[in-house]
Structure formats: C-alpha cells, structure tokens
Amino acid sequence: MSRTTCMRCLVAALALLAAALPASAASGAASASHSLRVYAVPNTVQFMNHADDRLRGMATNPFKFKSEAVILNDNGKEKGQGPFPGDDILYTFKLFADPTLTRPAGTALFTCYYEFLKRATCDSYFDLAKGLVLASGQVRFGQAHFTLGITGGTRAYLGALGQVSSVPAAKNTQRFDLHVTGTPQ
Amino acid sequence: MSRGLPAALAALVATAAAAAAVPTAQARADGRSLFFYAKPTQAQFINHADDRARGLKSNPFNADIDLPPPPKANAGKKGGRAGDNALFAFKLYSGPNLTRLVGTAVYNCTFNFAHEAICEADFEFARGSMVAMGPARLGSNFSRIVLPVTGGTGTYLGAHGQMTSTPSVYKNTQIVHFQLV
C-alpha cells in the first residue's frame, strides 16, 4: 500500500469519525422515552359557577364588544346548564396501575377553565411514585376521549415532554396512556 | 499533493474535535443550576365562595353523577377552598443578603382540595423569563414546593426542568433553585 493510499484511508477514517461524533454525542445526550398506562377513578369534583362575574363583566369590561348574545336568552338568563365561559371545574382522580383497580399508582388533578362552546383549557398533573407529570390541553365538556400535551415533570420525569391520551375504560374509569419523552436516561 | 494532506487532516481533526466539543458545551449551558432568594412583596386572596355555592346548585352535571367535593375539604378549616385564587409577588435576589435585585416572580394559584393548589409561576429577569407550573401546598405559609419548568424566553428560551422553592429562616425568604436540563 502506497503512502498516498494510506493517507487517503486515514482521511476517509477521520471523515467517518467526524461524521460519527455528532451522532454519538447526540445519542449520549439523548433522552429516554417510555409509556405508562394508568386507570383513573373519579374521586371528587367541584364546579365553580361564575354567573355573577360573567354578568358583571358584561356590564363593565375594558372592551367594546357586547357579549350578552353569546350566553344570554331574551329573558336575560343563561342558555342551558353550561359550563359557560369563565366557569371552572376541578376534578381529582385516584390512579391505579391495573384495570382491576387493585394497585394504587398515585393521584391526578385536573383544573379546567371553560371558554366557549363548552370547551376548556385543562391543566393537569399526575402525582406518581417516581415524580410528577404535568399536562395541558383542550377538553370538551363530557368528552372522554382527549389528548393533552405533557409540558414538564419533576424527579424521574424531569424535563418530560410527550402526550397523555384519555379513553373511557370499564367500571366508570378513565384510562390514561402517558407517552413520556425527554426525560434523562 | 502529498503536502496538502496534512492540512486536510488537520482540518478534519479540527472538525472532529469541534463536533465533539459542541454537544459538551451545550450540555454545560443547558444543564444549568440556578439559585435565587425570593422575598414576598404582595399577596391577594380571591374568595369565590359565592361561585362555589352557586356551582353546587347550578351545574352541568347529570343527576346520576354524584361526586360531591370531599366533605372536609371546603368546610371547617381555615385557608383556601376549591376554586379560590391566590396571587403572590416576590422580588428575586442573587444572594441571601438581599442586596442585588435580579428579577421578580408572580405565583398565580388556584386552590383545589385540602389546601393544595395548582400554581403558575412566572419569573422575570433582565434578560429573559421562565414559567413553571404545578401543585403547591398552601397553608398559612409557603412550604417546600417543586414545580416543573415548562418554558422560557430570552436567555432562558426553551427552558425545561424543575424549580424547587424552599423556605429559608433568613429574612423570611424562599430559596428558589432552578434545575434545567
């Protein structure tokens, strides 16, 4: 093998090394991804009816629009049972690791602030044995199927991202599938 | 031509070294641990007792859904009830002697049950901000709270991690520790 050929081999090897290094470094910094399934039993609920605040806000507000028609009937009463914009609902759940609800896995809390058309922005946290997972997103009132974005976590879920999918399960429970990414390996 | 090879080699070695160094530098920059000392300046409690009472009578739930609030959660105890709000403002200092002001913080908390609240905490600094959110136990005073950090701006753009606030006996302050990934 000539010296030139040898040097070319060396250059090629170094080029490969240069190409490989960012990849290896990236994989070293790569974060873990895992899924977790829990079954949630509703525990408590608190509905906050802000009818008076809404009414006051229609009369006195910093804007120039009139929102009476959005939620008021001709007789001045709110249409239907709501929830209406500004209302909020707090839900707590007991979490279990199995569908037979024998192995406790923590608790969850949802705070949902209602906007229009019975849609709410919900902030939730799942208090699990290894840490806390925080998730937020839109949920329509009464809808069991929804997906929230995971925005953070603590301890084992430090820096967590991902999503939480909710589907109805047996025995009046909700099944939450947490797909967690971004946590340290 | 053969004289040119060492230069190419040097360039490749430099490239390889730089490629290896960049993630390390990022890891150092991103894996930050920051400490601040928070002194409370203002507080506002918003009592939603009327909305709570109205919500028990007029609500969108069907009659077959029977999930009352826990009986002892909203009665017989001092402190926030489900749905009440509490706002807290802080000044942030770089050291325990509280001489160098570096920013401000506001906690916006909504109580749920048993004196626990979900709080959104906004931290404003000269060159950016950070947001954290999560549960906090709010009794007569702040106990230790740990909130996930969900984002930031400026110097803290894309901040992610957790924030721990621990009471300090020194000058009625909280020690705020950011652990960013």
Image (cartoon, coloured by chain):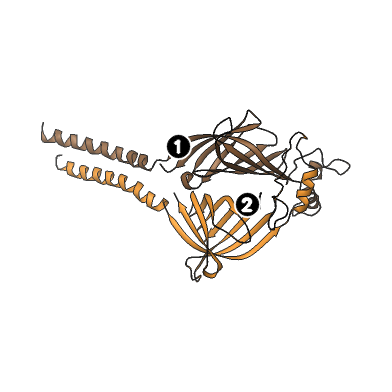
Residue beneath the point at 79% across and 47% down:
B54
Q: Nearer the viewer, residue B161 or B75?
A: B75
Q: Is residue B159 visible?
A: no
Question: Tag on residue B181?
Answer: none
Residue B69 image-quadrant placement: top right
Residue A180's x, y, as percent? 49, 38
Disc 1 marks a residue whose amino acid type is Ser
**Comparing marks 1 and 2, which lies closer to the viewer?**
2
Disc 2 marks a residue whose amino acid type is Glu
Q: Which residue matches tag 1? A: A33
**Chain in brown (letter):** A
Q: Are marks 1 and 2 on the same chain?
A: no
Label 1 crowding class (10 Å Cα cut-off): few <14, some 14-19, many 20+? some
Residue B102 appears left or right of A56: left
Q: Are circles 1 and 2 on residues that touch, CB within 8 Å?
A: no
Label 2 crowding class (10 Å Cα cut-off): few <14, some 14-19, many 20+? some
Q: Which residue matches tag 2? A: B116
Residue B170's x, y, as percent? 51, 69
Residue A101's x, y, as percent? 59, 33
Residue B10 image-quadrant placement: top left
In the rendered structure, the residue with mark 1 lies on which chain?
Answer: A
In the rendered structure, the residue with mark 2 lies on which chain?
Answer: B
Q: Secondary structure at mark 1?
A: strand
Residue A172 appears left or right of B153: right
Q: Secondary structure at mark 2?
A: strand
**Chain in orange (letter):** B
Q: Nearer the viewer, residue A25 or B50?
A: B50
Residue B6 appears left or right of B127: left
Residue B109 image-quadrant placement: bottom right
Residue A115's x, y, as percent? 70, 43
